[in-house]
Image: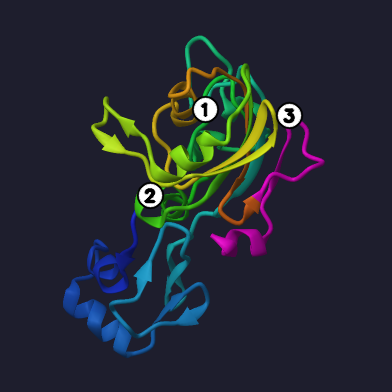
Amino acid sequence: MTRRHPMRLDRFLGNQPHLNRRDARLLLAGGRVRVDGQVVSDGCFEIREFSRIELDDSVLQAGRAARYFMLHKPAGVVSATCHEQHRTVLDLLDEPDRQELHLAGRLDLGTTGLLLITNDGQWSRRITHPQHKLAKVYYVETADPIGEEYIETFARGLYFAFEDLVTQPAHLEILDSRSARLTLFEGRYHQVKRMFGHFRNRVLRLHRESMGPLWLEPGLMPGQYRSLTPEEIRLI
């Protein structure tokens, strides 16, 4: 059974066909339950679908392998798991059971850059949930010059009538007359284009360079991907 949220170990044991809650307490107290090879006696211990759970010599849950990938999304590919008209980012992965994977954040059809893909829902929520305010850095090229007044306006926040809200403060670094680096702490619908649209300046190119502490590897070409390292996974 696949769970998207953690579950208490005693509840997991009590849900087994041949066990009840009293049995669970006795088994835990007797040191007969192991999680990922370690004896656990605390019923409040949280387990997930990736946990291997053993009772004596029996395996109650084998545990799934957690997978984490960094993809350089090319333009023209949809940030979705399936689509009738366009190739999706999952189509770029040569991985078994790729239908079990999901996206930790999305990019528009024409936007390129860093995309994180995983089967770990708890990990991806730490990336995408607004309360965590994970910084996302974008390289932007525009049709018209970018003025100094953009910096103050973006830092103050812009009113989006459709959502009836003011955007969180964003940091803009002007690189030259028509390019900049923008740091956001949220992910509203077409947010970057709408922010520059406030000045009637059209975005010609949009490329995500980083999400939180994870930066797109320079040598990763559009359409290529790689597994995250254990250290990169821990950074989130």
The amino acid sitting under disc 2 is: His
From what the image shows, is residue 195 above or below residue 219? above
Magenta-colored span: 215-236
From what the image shows, is residue 9 above or below residue 25? above
Q: CA distance from mark 1 to mark 2?
A: 18 Å
Along the line of sight, the residue nearer the viewer: 158 or 57: 158
> Percent x, y for residue 146?
60, 28
Q: CA distance from mark 2 to mark 3?
A: 27 Å
Q: Residue 173 occupies which quadrant of the picture?
A: top right
User: Residue placed at 48% from the left, 42% from the top?
Assistant: 152
Q: Is residue 165 left or right of residue 103?
A: left
Q: Which mark is residue 120?
A: none
Q: Please tell me whether mark 2 sits on a helix, a strand or a loop.
A: loop
> Percent x, y for residue 159?
31, 33
Q: Which mark is residue 222?
A: 3
Q: Which mark is residue 129?
A: 2
The amino acid sitting under disc 3 is: Pro
Along the line of sight, the residue nearer the viewer: 226 or 132: 132
Q: Is residue 216 magenta?
A: yes
Q: Tags 1 and 3 in contact by the CB under 8 Å rule?
A: no
User: Residue placed at 26% from the left, 30% from the top?
Assistant: 163
Q: Is residue 93 visible?
A: no
> Percent x, y for residue 91?
61, 25
The earlier-in-sequence mark between 1 and 3 is 1
User: Residue placed at 30% from the left, 89% from the top?
Assistant: 29
Q: Is residue 121 left or right of residue 109?
A: left
The amino acid sitting under disc 1 is: Ser
Residue position marked by numbered label 1 in the rendering: 79
Q: Please tell me whether mark 1 sits on a helix, a strand or a loop.
A: loop
